[in-house]
Structures are given as structure tokens and as C-alpha cells.
Image (cartoon, rainbow, N blue to C red):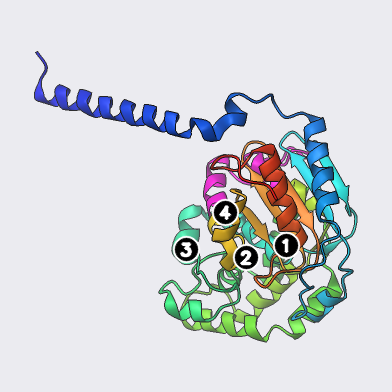
Amino acid sequence: MLTPRLAAGLATLTRTLALALALSVTLAPFNVRSAAAAPLTAEDYQRVVDEAYAKFKDVKDGANADYIPILATVPSEMFGIALVTRDGKIYAAGEQKYEFSIQSVSKPFTASLIMAEQGPKVLREKIGVEPTGLPFNSKLAMELYESRSVNPLVNAGAIAAVSLVQADSEQARWNKVLGNIEAYAGRKLQVLEEVYDSEYETAWSNRGIANLLFNYGRLYSDPEEALRVYTRQCSIGINTRDLGIMGATLANEGVNPFTGKRVLDAEDVPELLAIMATAGFYDESGEWMYRSGLPAKTGVGGGIVAVVPGKFAIATFSPPLNEAGNSVRGLKAINYISGELGVGLFGPNRSE
């Protein structure tokens, strides 16, 4: 005879199994590729990358960022795509060698440095993980939210993240930030000094953010030091291939597929990707997830990286941006590739 406790346990198990079955039936139509389609081949990857490049290379919408004066001088016709798999295969089209400034695409990678050094809890408690729903450089968000810095993928949170890096000097702080991004890219990288000078000389808004954070007790180093290191971080030069490898490292559970170096613990990768999914496209993040279904990060230098966990990353470079600060050709290309390959996290999306 069943005891009341055992009967309750069996009832709970029955309900759980019924729910799992219902979910599997409900979601089955959205997982056609994983359940029935043939595995993706090298030809599939290259074909879709080539199609995306041909389809969007002549798009004229958008304009280069000009609030950092030197970014307005980057040739707007440049466009590159690199799809990099977790086992180190690269499928590319268009511009691959030109080094552009990483800008805000650097933010999740420095956030991951905080996670690697001090754990995800520190990132959540000392910065925050909520999307603001406001522009990336918003000061209003700092007044609306008690945590002030709010999220490591907007400027306030990214400056706070730099200040959280464990270091006893500005040079040591910078060395850690640069070394971490180099570990993701798998090679030595250089700061584009002209970009740094242009950005630092006009950094009045970010300087105000740093000082406000310090005033609220949400900055963890000298404000001007944090601003300099953050600006230098944004001025690192990378190419499309580098950015694809950085994303592929996250797709490969934190291990660079070319160097074999572990950059982030596998158990911390999902939390980082969750932040990218909710805030990687600034105040256009909901629209992005609705369309592509992939965690991603964009930057005003024209770069975007999107991650398909456990499979590959897609990186693009194209300087003209939309009003939200996201590369027009890049977002179209990644959305197309995601849709054609059926890799959106919530099921195959409609490609454009």
C-alpha cells in the first residue's frame, strides 16, 4: 500500500512526465532540422555565407558612426562575413583582413573576464544583468535603476566591468583586458591609436558616466583610469575572422578552437550568452531575438558576432549603422544565415 508521501511523489513524477511529453509534441514542429534534416555540410555553410554576402553587399542603408570622428572615415562599402565552427573550420566571404575597432563587441568578453576571475555572482551583484531598454550610452538608465550600472553590455556597466578587473595598477588592468581578448581571438592584437585618440578626446559622455558611477559607489577604481582602459579596450583592432574565432570560442564552451586554450569555464558560458541575448543589440535587442533567435553583440565600429551554442559563430563587419547603432548589412546577413540554416535557439526563424 502506498504511503501518502510516496503517492504524492508518484503524482508529481506523473505530472512532470506529462508536461515533458506535451512540450516535446508542441516543440517538435520547430525542431525539424535537428530531428529530420540531414546534417549541415561544409558546402551548406559556404553556400549560405556566399548567398548572404551577395544578397546584402549592395545595401546602401545606414551611415557610419560619427560621434567618434575617426569612425566616419572608415570606407562604408566594406563588408565581410565569417562563419567559424567550434572545431575550427572557417567559411568566409568579403572583407577578412581589414582591422576595424572592436568597440562595444568587446563588452561581453571583458564581462567574461570578471566571471573567470571572480565568478558570475560578482558580475550580477556589482554591475547587474538587466537590459535597460534605453540607448547604450544612456545616463537616464542610471537614475531609473537602483543598480546604476545595470548591465555589462551598456557603457555604464562596461566601464564598471573594467574597473572590477583585479589589478594594482592601470597597466596591469590593461594587460589583463587585452590579454583576455587576445585569448579569445587566438593572436596578438594592437590598439588602433588613432581611434583611441579620437575616442578619448571626445569621451565627455563616458567621462560623465564614470564619474556618476563613482559617486554612487558602483565604480571600483579611479574614474579616469577606468575610462582610459575602457576606451583603449574599444580601440583594439580586429578583423572579421578574429571576431568569428572569438564567437566560436563561446560556441565551443569557452575553449578557443584554434589554440585549444580555455578562456572561460564551460559552466559560465550560458550565463554570458544569456546577457548577450537580452542586451547585445542595445535597445533593439528584443527585435533582434524576435528575428534571429541568437545571442549576439554589436558595436558601432561595424562588427557583430552571433553565437550558435555548441555549433558555430557568425561574425560580420560593415560600418554603416541603423539608428540603434547596429550594422545594417551585418544584422541582415546574420539573420539570413540563421534562418537558412535553421539554427535559431527557439526554432528556425524566417530569413530575409
User: SS class of the residue under badge 3?
Assistant: loop
User: SS class of the residue under badge 1?
Assistant: helix
The spot of residue 213 in percent (x, y) is 52, 79
Q: Distance between the residues labelled 4 and 2?
A: 36 Å
Q: Distance between the residues labelled 4 and 3?
A: 16 Å
Q: What residue type is labelled 1?
A: Asn
Circle on res. 175: 1
Q: Nearer the viewer, mark 4 or mark 1?
A: 4
Residue drawn at 61 percent across, 46 percent down: 264
Question: Which is nearer the N-term, disc 2 or disc 1?
Answer: 2
Closer to the camera, 27 or 92?
Answer: 27
Question: Which is nearer the N-term, disc 4 or disc 3?
Answer: 3
The spot of residue 270 in percent (x, y) is 54, 45
Residue drawn at 78 percent across, 33 percent down: 44
Q: What residue type is labelled 2?
A: Ala
Residue drawn at 16 percent across, 27 percent down: 8
Query: Would you name the residue on which mark 3 appears?
Result: 130
Q: Quadrant of residue 12?
A: top left
For residue 61: magenta? no
Q: What residue type is labelled 3?
A: Glu
Q: Which amino acid does label 4 sit on?
A: Met
Q: Taking 70 as reference, is 314 above or below it?
A: above
Q: Nearer the viewer, mark 4 or mark 2?
A: 4
Query: Would you name the residue on which mark 4 appears?
Result: 289
Q: In this view, does 116 lie to the left or right of 21?
A: right
Question: Which is nearer the N-term, disc 4 or disc 1?
Answer: 1
The spot of residue 314 in percent (x, y) is 73, 47
Residues in magenta, as a range: 246-274
The spot of residue 54 in percent (x, y) is 86, 50
| Whether residue 21 is visible | yes
Circle on res. 313: none
